Image (cartoon, rainbow, N blue to C red):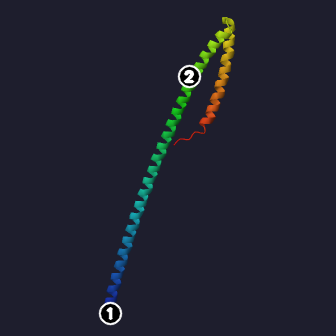
Amino acid sequence: MNEGAYKAADKAEDTKEKAKDYAEDTMDNAKEKARHAKEKVKEYGEDTKEKAEGFKETVKGKAEELGEKTKETVKGAWESTKNAAQTVTEAVVGPEEDAEKARADMNKGVEDHRKKKAEKDQKEDDFITFN
């Protein structure tokens, strides 16, 4: 074989090696980028999950707090109303027999009013948003 053919064969072998090295580098680079993207997606997922759990806890806490306040308000209003009804009954009705019947009627009226108020408050609470 002549010298030109050897040079061409050497050059072809060098080019083949360079192409192989370039392909390996490209593949390694692609794998690294894929690993990096996978890590970012995992981090984003964890962050999103943490934020969702934090939001859930905040909403739950606000709802429980609102429920407790409502319960306390209704209980206080009920006690005040009962006491006022007792005082009015005793002042208006007089004797104990009549007072018990009047008290029962008054308590039923107060209970009906409380139920209507609770329904109205519940409808208003349904429109509350939490920040």
**Viewer-nearest residue: 82 or 60:** 82
Tag in front: 2 or 1 = 2
Quadrant of residue 9 in the image? bottom left
The x and y percentages for residue 107 are: 65, 17
- In the image: residue 18, left or right of residue 56: left
Crowd band around label 1 with a 10 angstrom C-alpha radius: few (<14), some (14–19), many (20+): few
Label 2 to label 1: alpha-carbon separation: 107 Å
Residue that mark 1 sits on:
4
Q: Disc 2 residue type?
A: Gly
Q: Quadrant of residue 80?
A: top right
Residue 111 % position (x, y): 65, 21
The mark that comes first in sequence, 2 or 1, is: 1
Please tell me which residue is depicted at 67% across the width and 19% down the height of the picture.
108
Callout count = 2
Residue at image position (51%, 39%) is 59
Up the image or down, 58 lies above or below 25; here it is above
Residue visible at 56% across and 29% down in the picture: 70
With respect to residue 64, does 42 lie above or below? Answer: below
Where 33 sits versus 7, above or below?
A: above
Extreme residue toward the front, this view: 91
User: Which residue is denoted by mark 2 in the rendering?
Assistant: 76
**Mark 2, other Cα within 10 Å: few <14 / some 14–19 / many ≥20:** few
- Give the vertical position of 60 relative to 26 (above or below): above
